[in-house]
C-alpha cells in the first residue's frame, strides 16, 4: 500500500503569492467594488454630494441609443482587431520560422512594435494618414482615393483598427513563433515523405498543434481590443468624427472625465467589466472544448 507524502506547511508559500494578491486587491478588486458602489449614485450639479438612485444609471444606459450603438461598434471593432492581428501574426510567424540566415534580425524587427506605447502608435499612424502631409494619403490620392479620416467615419474606424492590430501583431507573433518551433521537425518530415504539400502540412499539422496557443491569444486579443486600445483612439480620433470610433472604454472616459457624470461612467465600467468577463467565460466554456491539447 502506497503511503501519501505529507509536506510541512509554512509561511513561505503565502509570502511568495502575497505580492500578486496585494496588487490584485488594490488595482482590480477594490476599484471594481468602488465602481459598483458609484454606479448606484448620481452626483449633484456642484459635485459636493451624491444621491442614491439604485439601478437608474443602468436603466438610462440601455435606453440611450448612442450607448447601444457604441456596444455594437465595440464588438465589431474588437472582432476585426483580433482577427487581423492574429491572422497577420500567424503569417509572419510561419515565414520567419522558415528563415535560416538573418533569423534573429527578422524576428527583432517584427517584435519592435510591441515596445511602442499605444499613444505613440496612434500618433505614427495619424501622421502617415494625415490628409495634407501623410505619405500614405499622398499615394492613395494618386490612385484617386480621397482619404480624410477627420470627416469620414468609416475611414477613421478602418484606420483605428489597422493601428490597433499593428500594435498587437508583435505580441501574437512571439507566441505563434514559439509554438511553431516547439513542433518536432520529424512530424513535418514524415508528412513530406508521404507527399503532403507545404500548404497541406500547414493546415493539417501546424494549425491543429497551434490550437492551444491560438485559443490563448484569442482571449488576450479580445481583452486588448476592449481595454488597451484607449490610448490609440485618444491619440488618433478622440472618438470622432461623430462618435464613429467611440468604443466602450473610451465612452467611460468621455462620460466620467469630460462629462463629469461619475455615476453614469461607473455604470458603464460595470457593464464593460461584465461583458468582458462574460466573453472570457464563453470562450473557456465553449471555444476551449474544440481545442486539442
Image (cartoon, helix red, strand yellow):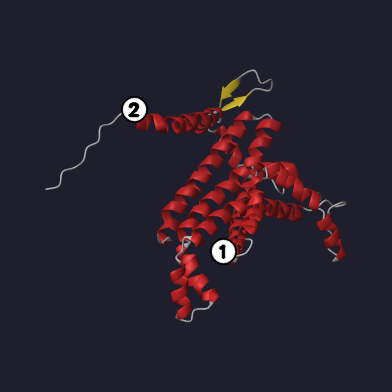
**Disc on the earlier residue, 2 or 1:** 2
- Report the Cα–Cα distance between label 2 and label 1: 45 Å
Res 289 → quadrant: bottom left
**Residue found at x 52% / y 45%:** 276
Q: Position of residue 125 (x, y in %)?
A: 75, 50
The crowding category of the residue bearing disc 2, from other C-alpha atoms within 10 Å (few below 14, some 14 to 19, many at least 20), is: few
**Label number found at residue 11:** 2
Circle 2 SS class: loop
Q: Position of residue 215 (x, y in %)?
A: 48, 56
Residue marked by disc 1: 97
**Residue found at x 48% / y 47%:** 278
Left or right of 82 in this view: 274 = left
Give above or below for 243 relative to 193: above
Viewer-proximal residue among 93 and 236: 93
Give above or below for 149 relative to 44: below
Q: Which quadrant would the C terminus be assigned to in this image?
A: bottom left
Amino acid at each position: 500500500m502506497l503511503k501519501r507524502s505529507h509536506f510541512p506547511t509554512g509561511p513561505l508559500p503565502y509570502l511568495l503569492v502575497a505580492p500578486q494578491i496585494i496588487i490584485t486587491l488594490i488595482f482590480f478588486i477594490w476599484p471594481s467594488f468602488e465602481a459598483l458602489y458609484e454606479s448606484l449614485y448620481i452626483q449633484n450639479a456642484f459635485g459636493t454630494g451624491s444621491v442614491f438612485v439604485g439601478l437608474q444609471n443602468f436603466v438610462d444606459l440601455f435606453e440611450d441609443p448612442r450607448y447601444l450603438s457604441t456596444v455594437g461598434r465595440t464588438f465589431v471593432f474588437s472582432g476585426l482587431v483580433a482577427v487581423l492581428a492574429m491572422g497577420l501574426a500567424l503569417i509572419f510567424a510561419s515565414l520567419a520560422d522558415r528563415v535560416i540566415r538573418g533569423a534573429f534580425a527578422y524576428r527583432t524587427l517584427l517584435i519592435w512594435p510591441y515596445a511602442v506605447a499605444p499613444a505613440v502608435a496612434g500618433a505614427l499612424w495619424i501622421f502617415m494618414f494625415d490628409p495634407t502631409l501623410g505619405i500614405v494619403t499622398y499615394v492613395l490620392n494618386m490612385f484617386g482615393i480621397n482619404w480624410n479620416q477627420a470627416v469620414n467615419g468609416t475611414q477613421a474606424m478602418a484606420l483605428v483598427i489597422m493601428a490597433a492590430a499593428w500594435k498587437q501583431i508583435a505580441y501574437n507573433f512571439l507566441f505563434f513563433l514559439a509554438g511553431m518551433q516547439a513542433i518536432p521537425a520529424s512530424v513535418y518530415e514524415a508528412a513530406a515523405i508521404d507527399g503532403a504539400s507545404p500548404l497541406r502540412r500547414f493546415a493539417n499539422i501546424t494549425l491543429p498543434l497551434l490550437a492551444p496557443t491560438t485559443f490563448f491569444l484569442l482571449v488576450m486579443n479580445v481583452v486588448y481590443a476592449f481595454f488597451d486600445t484607449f490610448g490609440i483612439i485618444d491619440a488618433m480620433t478622440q472618438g470622432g468624427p461623430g462618435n464613429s470610433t467611440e468604443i466602450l472604454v473610451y465612452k467611460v472616459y468621455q462620460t466620467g472625465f469630460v462629462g463629469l457624470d461619475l455615476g453614469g461612467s461607473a455604470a458603464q465600467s460595470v457593464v464593460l467589466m461584465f461583458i468582458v468577463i462574460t466573453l472570457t467565460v464563453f470562450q473557456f466554456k465553449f471555444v476551449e472544448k474544440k481545442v486539442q491539447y
